[in-house]
Image: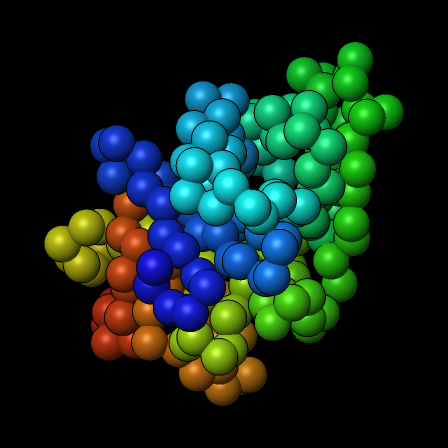
Amino acid sequence: EIAKDLYLVNDSAAWRNSLFKVNGDKIIVFGASGYPAQAEKTIRLIGEQFPKQQITSIYVTHPHGSDIDGLKVYVDQGIEILADEYTIAAIKAYPDFAADIDRFKFRTIDHEQIIDGAHFYVLENMHSKRQSFVHFKDSGIIFQADFLHIAFDNTIAKVIPNYTRTFIDFVRSKQLKFKRIVGNYQNNNISVEVMNKTYDAMM
């Protein structure tokens, strides 16, 4: 538990990270659909820890294969997919889901929408035309995938992609208050200081 009712899940290699938020008898999972085995293990883990709650939604940041390949596992459980309009369209066009797409349940996320205390933002960027992240305002936590690529030891890269700048510029322009950024990949505890140093490396 990294904040009230907000839990961090790592895979065994500490390569992938996901979150889940408990809202009464419902649970939303964030970023745990990269591949079927990850989805299955995450669902099983949550079921063991919270047997009286039900997973109702799985949140997807963007529609790259490495971020959606495990979605069918959630669909088989009747769990809806939370994503922006662009990402939903791409999931519907994904060949691997063609035979089952009629069973997929979607809930569209709009820019600056709030769902159960989670604030969603959808950004135009060069990593994936549109890509979203979530800010848990009360907890001071941001969950994002691929906007920031930060190593476990917080080493700052010398070359930074422009979509990283897009993300940081937006966070600053909205004055989002946070104390920790959880990356869907690698580092799950990125500080404000590390984010700022990353931005300065681009100057």
Residue at 30% over, 54% down? 188
Q: Quadrant of residue 111?
A: bottom right
Q: Quadrant of the C terminus?
A: bottom left
Q: Position of residue 153 (x, y in %)?
A: 13, 54
Residue 195 in which image quadrant: bottom left
- Does 100 sit left or right of 79 as displayed? right
- Residue 99 or residue 155, whichever sits in front: 99
Q: In this rendering, does residue 190 appear at all? A: yes
Residue at horizontal 27 percent and vertical 52 percent from the top: 187
Count of numbered badges drawn on the protein: 0
Does residue 125 show up? no
User: Residue 27 in the image: x percent, y percent?
Assistant: 58, 51
Please identify the residue farthest to the right as the structure is shown.
102
168 vs 180, left or right, is right
Quarter the N terminus occupies? bottom left
Q: Residue at x 48, y 46 (%)?
A: 50
Asked whether 52 or 151 is in front, the reply is: 52
Q: In the rendered view, tell whether residue 32 sits above or below residue 123.
A: above
Residue 158 in the image: above or below residue 15: below
Looking at this view, name the residue that lies furthest to the top.
99
